[in-house]
Image (cartoon, rainbow, N blue to C red):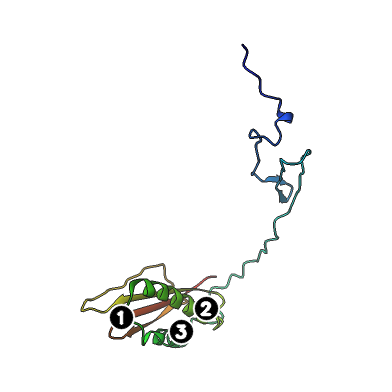
Amino acid sequence: MDEPKAPPARERRGSLFEVKSSKPKICGSSVMTMAVQPESSYEDVSFRRPPLKMEYENTYKTAPDVRFQVGKVKTIIDESLALLEKEEYEVYHCRELAKHLSQEIKDKVKEIGMSRHKIISWVTIGQKCDQSMRIGSRCLWDDGNDNFAWGEFENPSLHATAIVYGIYQD
């Protein structure tokens, strides 16, 4: 008894043997992808172009147009942390609250208009029960263009620290 042979490749279309290509093909300056639909009796091949990517020329600026405004950022931090006045420390709630505050502070700082700065916001909330805490961070720093602002808050249940870094990107 001979083993039955597999049907030729053109008859296997739409079966488990079909190989789908997910690799994009490069033609000239655009990328084309092919989509093969196994349900149809013919191969439906469509080509699409990726969205255009904007490319900007270098400005070669070595100093920002608008410096990091520590006073305004400190005010934003203090106003945001003041919302914790009536909060009680609860682990899961404070974790989400720290994420929310960090995003809110970053969004408000971006509204100031320091367009060439990368804004990094970091909020830490901890339980207050007779312990100490140290926070440290490190990064490459340009004293002339980069800066930071920070604020603290305490109530009988928790303590919070917020730090915002403004790193100039040329």
- Report the Cα–Cα distance between label 2 and label 3: 11 Å
Q: Is residue 7 visible?
A: yes
Mark 3: secondary structure: helix
Mark 2: secondary structure: helix
Look at label 1 and name its amino acid.
Answer: Leu
Look at label 3 and name its amino acid.
Answer: Val
- Residue that badge 1 annotates: 158
- Residue that badge 3 annotates: 73
- Residue that badge 2 annotates: 107
- Report the Cα–Cα distance between label 3 and label 1: 23 Å
Look at label 2 and name its amino acid.
Answer: Asp
Bin the neighbour count of mark 3 within 10 Å (Cα to Cα): few under 14, some 14-19, many 20 and up. many
Residue shown at 36% from the left, 87% from the top: 86
In percent of width and height, residue 87 lies at: 36, 83
Q: Is residue 165 visible?
A: no
Residue shown at 66% from the left, 63% from the top: 55
